[in-house]
Every structure is written in structure tokens, then in C-alpha cells.
Amino acid sequence: MDGRSERMGKNGGYDAVVVGAGPNGLAAAIAVAQSGRSALVLEAGDTPGGGARTSELTLPGFRHDVCSALHPLAIGSPFLSGLPLDEHGLRWIHPRYPVAHPLDDGSAAVLERDVDATAAALGADARAYRRLMSPLVRDWDVIARGALGPLRLPRNPIVMGRFGVKALRSARRLAETWLRTERARALFAGIAAHSVTPPEYRASAAAGLILQTAGHAVGWPMPLGGAQSITDAMASYLQSLGGEVVTGVRVGSLDELPRARVALLDVGARQFASMAGDRLSERYRRRLTAFRYGPGVFKMDWALDAPIPWTAAECADAGTVHLGGTLDEIAAAEAAVWRGEHPEKPFVLVAQPSMFDATRAPPGKHVAWAYCHVPHGSDLDMTERVERQIERFAPGFRERILARSVMPPSALEAYNANYVGGDIGGGANTLRQLFARPVSAFAPYRTPIDGVYLCSASTPPGGGVHGMCGYWAARAAIGGM
């Protein structure tokens, strides 16, 4: 009997079977394997990855990130950052500026790794910015551990209390309370808009503070070779621990799972309800039905014959560029999306990995990645509006396009069933659903079915390539073995 068979146990099954080889599914399997138990991961796609895959979406030799592109929460994840992924091929690239936010006067506000350098460029807001961000950066490890998980008593209540007072505000209120200039407010508003909620919503400041603090503390890096490199390193490490990943296996029902002591499902609330069938009570099924999905995204990739011709020179040195103008303009665009409307000037997130990673495009050529927020399930083609926003801050952009790939919400959901209606975050980031994901419970990963746990972005702490949903779910499952 080999070592793996011994770990499988006397019943010939596994300790844990994981459905879905996205970052959370792989993290769950790794945590199980680290505890000395056997883990099998089943993935419907031909390759593992979920939201962290890289593919030639436009032309041969142009490698695009299918979903995620920049990864502050991966390098800053309390779990992933402790794994020896560098020994399995993962290399991080740090652009000079994690984020740039161009304005219509031809300048750009920039987030630098150094708090003082960022503050110095914010003029009248320099002192206030240091007062706001310096304590958060100092306490990053505590905040990341406390915020990237389920609701629980904090280990350091003083630090988390100070963070919570700011994070539970709306992004607008925090920006207007702490900052006076349009540049500083716009920079924060663009980062907070990653929450996919209007800046007037309660707790919309949380995402902005987490991501802005991460930019200073750990950066907003990209993996050499694309997001697939994160997946490949995680899968390789899992296999070094004795875990297995099997692709091309679509699980439609819990009854189709191989024998295992526990099952960890990297699937959304809707998918879980379908897989569980009549094993769920009507009462619990109604609770799942009440789970709210958020707006979708309209995602684009381009093959370019030259770099994006930004008016503001700083943008060329930024991994991520936020296009949305002022706080008020971003607020108007995001509010329109939540009303079911399509803004004429959408907030657009742009990444330009080939500016820093030559492996992503043929010599002298480039790739660009972008998306904007749209109403849930939208079928409107936003190509013209997205490209017009880029042209606004980079005149001549369209002249450099060799080919484009377009993924509306329907294409994203077809690519990954967890992206219901194009919602890449696994559920709306409302105040209630920051922790009540997918239902309100003290043990959010445990389901009513004995031995079955959820580990997707539909559980705390929600969307992002951080693996923390998988980690916390595995901790709960291991405790129940």
C-alpha cells in the first residue's frame, strides 16, 4: 500500500473531496493536505484555475488573464502568503505604481508603495493621508487576518476596532471626512469601487481601505506569466503534499461524489442548491434563494501593436489604471448600475501586464485587460463606452488595437457557473452580506448536510484571489472530521 492509499483510509475513500479548482478550492485542499489528510479536487474545466487562468483570447502569442489580473489579496493573503509557492514557480512582478488614476487635466493621482511618497503628491491632503493610512499599513497583518474571514471575536480588538470605525462608513463619507482635494478623493473612490457598490453605501469604505492599505503594505503585483501561474503553483504544491487534481469532471449532484469523509464545494449558493437537491429543507432553500447577487461585469481584452498612449505619463508605470474621473462621476456611474442602468461613462478598471512582463505578448506588442460594471445579467454591448473612456485618457488608443476579446456577463457565467449574471464576486457586497454569506450563521461554511461545506466566494470574506474562503472552510471541516 503506497503512502497515498494509507492516507485514504480503510474505507478506500478520501478524507476530503473538493469540487472546483479555483483558488478557494485549491486552498481548501491544501489546508486539508497540510493536516496530513487526503484530498481530491474535481474540476469541470480542462485546466484548474477558476478565476485565475491565462489564455490566448485574441491572437496567437498574446496571453490574457481570463478573469483576475492584479493580485494584492493573493500576495497579502494570510494563508497564501505562508505557502512556499515560490518553490513551485510563482514569481511576483511589482510595477512602479500599484495604481494610477488619471484626471481630465492631464495629470494622475498615484498610489505608491510608500505612504509618504503617495502623500507628498496629494498636496493639501498630504498630512491627512499619512494620518489615515500609516496606522493601517503598520497593522496590516492584524487587519488582513481579521478582515479576511468570518465574523468572530478579533484577536486584537483595539486594532480591529480602529479599522472597523472607518471601514463601516460609506466610501464617500470617509473620503469627504478625511480628504479635501479631488485628486485624493478620486484615488480612494476608484479603489473603493472594487467593491462593486456605490460609494454612498454603508461599509463601501471597507474594500477601499483593505485594497489601499494592501497597496502600501504588500503592493498590487502581477504573477510572471499571468494569473495561471498562481493556479499552477498551488496545484503543484498540493500535489507535493499528496493531493490530487482531476480535470474534466463536472459534478451535478452530491450523489456523484466519490466516497469521502467531507466534501468542500467551491460553488455558489445557486449551484449548491442544485447539487443538493432534495437533501435540503425548504426552509434552508428559501434562505439560499434570498442570497443576493450583485451587478455583473463587461470584460474586454486587447492585443495591441504598441503601449496604451496615456496622456499622464505616470499611467505607463502603473499595473492598474482606474478610469472614472472624480468621486462624483464614479458615484454616478456605480449608482446607475445598481438602478439597472448602463452609464455612458462607466468606471473602467484597466491592467496592462505586458508593460512589465515580456512573456505576455510577442516582441514589441502588448496586451491590455479591462472591465466595467453593468447591471446583473446585462446583455448590452459596452465596447464603445469602455473604449471611449480609455480614449478620454489615452487619445489614439483605438489606433493601436490589433484584435479584441469581449466577455459580457453571459459569457462570464458560461465560463464559470459561479459568476451568476456576471457577478465575479460571488454575491453582492452589501453590509449584510459582508458576513452573512450565503446565509446568516455562526458557522457560514457548514451546510445543513452532514459533512458538506461551502468554500466559494459566496462565503466570507467574499470575492478575490486570496484563498481565504477555502482556508476557513477547510479549518471547519477538519475540526468536524
Image (spheres, rainbow, N blue to C red):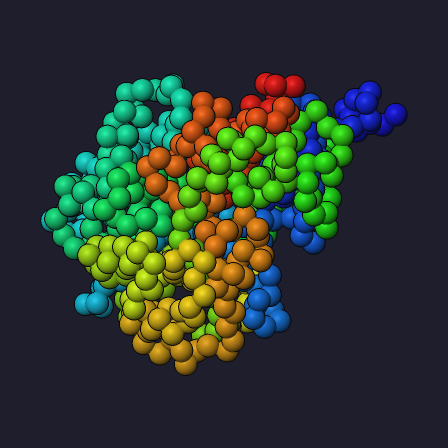
Give the camera-side residue of 303 and 82: 303
- Residue 360 lies, with reference to residue 465, above or below; the image says below
Q: Is residue 104 left or right of residue 285?
A: left
Compared to 342, does 364 lie above or below? below
Q: Residue at x 34, y 20 (%)?
A: 156
Q: Nearer the viewer, residue 172 or 285?
A: 285
Residue 408, image x, y percentages = 48, 64
- Comparing 462 with 31, the one in front is 462
Looking at the rendering, in which quadrant would you find the N terminus? top right
In the picture, residue 141 is in which quadrant? top left
| Image x and y of residue 81, in percent | 50, 35
Residue 263, image x, y percentages = 65, 31
Please state if 162 lies on the left or on the right of 255 as rendered. left
In this rendering, the answer to whether 281 lies above or below 87 is above
Image quadrant where one finds the C terminus: top right
297, 438: nearer the viewer: 438
The residue furthest bottom is: 399
Give the side of residue 455 with respect to residue 248, left or right: left
Q: Is residue 466 visible?
A: no
How many numbered marks are there?
Answer: 0
Residue that extends furthest to the front in the rendered view of this protein: 282
- Residue 131: quadrant of the picture: top left
Q: Residue at x 51, y 31 (%)?
A: 284
Residue at the far right in the pictured view: 1
Q: What residue is shown at x 16% (from left), y 55% (from top)?
A: 182
